[in-house]
């Protein structure tokens, strides 16, 4: 199985006259064999992207091309795509094997051959030996593996994944991420994945497209979006926590943190400094290399690495900076600490009073 190249151009869906578009003018490329994640909050239009791509709904404008062929008017079952949903939608009365063999049987394959192929795909999702069990006897994680095997058995040119792991607990979700990564290496499918979890997008996708209010805010490799979000909205959707309002003057961002050099030239004017908490280092108040000194006001344990919020006062104003501590590092609430903000990790975005207030919760933020 090898995946096809998917291209969405100007994709738009308006549900009723005068209503706000569910999707507005979205361009997106999913190169053959790559995994692109569409990331966005609830109602941002993620499922609409998948439904239009799969042919389950028709665009008001724009097009879907697979390997250069316009799919307008092509029925869903003829698009060479398979979809996995949040719920596995198995036939509970059929065996696991027959659930996976179903597509082959519908296409007229003899039962024995269809079942043999089904077993191969069950092996691939590490469920070899489960074929004879009734589907209703499976756990949630196993059900989702069967749904994945069933989708892969159809040998799709594009695999569409709609929040496929969001109903699973954190450990199972991580197992599924590893399984999918392994399947990608062996089968080279093209994957369009929808998720509201930036950690999942980071774990699975080569590129990420951030959607909000039906619009594509930014697309690129995950690392780039983490480090260089185009807007406050993207920063928040990717779990960015630190936002320091200030003004850029002569290549420096001036705020309660002081005047900080920026790595790239930025036009003068009001701007918000965003720095990933993973990039900030907490040191001592006496650290000569500290960029700012403040008070730890909140410490939240997150497994091995705690997250600390530091309040810094300057110019009569206060700013807060979040930092992730290294494994085993600890800071007591109320302590005065130094903060190092590496120049390469300082990034400014325009002031945006309309940016959604809450970052999307994700397991990694818990
Ligand atoms: N059939 C429909 N009729 C009217 N509005 C719709 C319809 N389907 C979706 N919408 C609206 O379009 C917008 C985008 O919906 P969509 O389901 O694509 O979002 P989503 O990002 O997948 O959300 P979620 O994560 O909650 O599933 C929403 O405002 C939704 O209410």
Image (tube, rainbow, N blue to C red):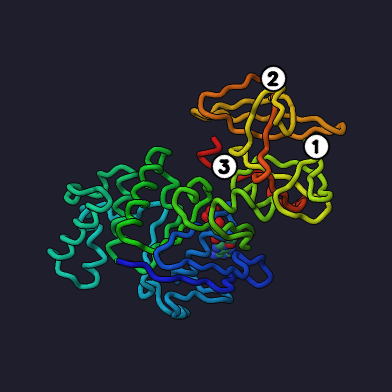
Mark 3 Cα within 10 Å, few/some/many (few <14, many 20+)? some
Who's the residue at 16% across and 50% down the image? 132
Who's the residue at 22% across and 52% down the image? 123
Q: Quadrant of the N terminus?
A: bottom left
Who's the residue at 20% across and 53% down the image? 95
Label 3 near ligand 1 (CB < 8 Å)? no
Report how far apart the C-alphas of labels 3 and 2 lie in the structure.
28 Å
Q: Which residue is mark 2?
A: 335
Name above or below for residue 149 compared with residue 330: below
Sequence-earlier tag: 3 or 2 = 2
Question: Regarding mark 2 in the picture, which secondary structure is present there?
Answer: loop
Identify which residue, 288 or 245, lies in the foreground: 288
Give the x, y percent position of residue 152.
31, 61
Name above or below for residue 219 compared with residue 307: below
Q: Which residue is mark 1?
A: 258
Left or right: 125, with 228 as reference point: left
Tag in front: 1 or 3: 1
Q: Which mark is residue 361?
A: 3
Left or right: 315, with 69 as reference point: right
Report how far apart the C-alphas of labels 1 and 3 lie in the structure.
31 Å
Name above or below for residue 292 compared with residue 343: above
Question: Regarding mark 1 in the picture, which secondary structure is present there?
Answer: strand
Mark 1 Cα within 10 Å, few/some/many (few <14, many 20+)? some
């Amino acid at each position: 199985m090898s995946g096809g190249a998917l291209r969405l151009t100007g994709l738009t869906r308006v549900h009723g006259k005068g209503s706000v578009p569910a999707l507005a003018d979205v361009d997106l490329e999913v190169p053959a064999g790559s995994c692109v994640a569409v990331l966005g909050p609830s109602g941002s239009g993620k499922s609409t992207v998948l439904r239009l791509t799969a042919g389950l709904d028709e665009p008001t404008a724009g097009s879907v091309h697979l390997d250069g062929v316009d799919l307008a008017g092509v029925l869903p079952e003829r698009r060479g795509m398979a979809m996995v949903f949040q719920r596995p939608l198995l036939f509970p009365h059929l065996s696991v094997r027959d659930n996976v063999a179903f597509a082959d049987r519908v296409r007229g394959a003899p039962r024995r051959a269809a079942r043999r192929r089904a077993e191969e795909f069950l092996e691939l999702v590490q469920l070899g030996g489960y074929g004879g069990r009734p589907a209703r006897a499976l756990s949630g994680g196993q059900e989702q593996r069967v749904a994945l095997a069933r989708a892969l058995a159809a040998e799709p040119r594009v695999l569409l994944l709609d929040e496929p792991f969001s109903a699973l607990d954190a450990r199972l979700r991580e197992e599924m991420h590893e399984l999918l990564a392994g399947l990608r290496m062996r089968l080279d499918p093209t994957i369009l994945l929808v998720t509201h979890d930036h950690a999942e997008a980071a774990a699975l996708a080569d590129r990420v497209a951030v959607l909000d209010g039906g619009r594509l805010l930014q697309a690129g490799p995950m690392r780039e979006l983490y480090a260089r979000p185009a807007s406050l909205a993207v920063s928040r959707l990717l779990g960015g926590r630190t936002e320091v309002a200030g003004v850029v003057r002569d290549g420096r961002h001036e705020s309660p943190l002081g005047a900080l050099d920026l790595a790239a030239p930025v036009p003068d004017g009001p701007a918000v400094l965003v720095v990933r908490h993973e990039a900030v280092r907490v040191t001592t108040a006496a650290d000569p290399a500290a960029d700012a000194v403040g008070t730890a006001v909140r410490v939240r344990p997150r497994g091995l690495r705690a997250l600390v919020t530091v309040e810094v006062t300057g110019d009569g104003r206060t700013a807060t900076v979040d930092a992730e501590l290294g494994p085993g590092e600890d800071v007591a609430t109320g302590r005065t600490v130094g903060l190092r903000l590496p120049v390469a990790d300082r990034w400014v975005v325009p002031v945006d009073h309309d940016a959604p207030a809450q970052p999307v919760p994700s397991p990694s933020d818990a």
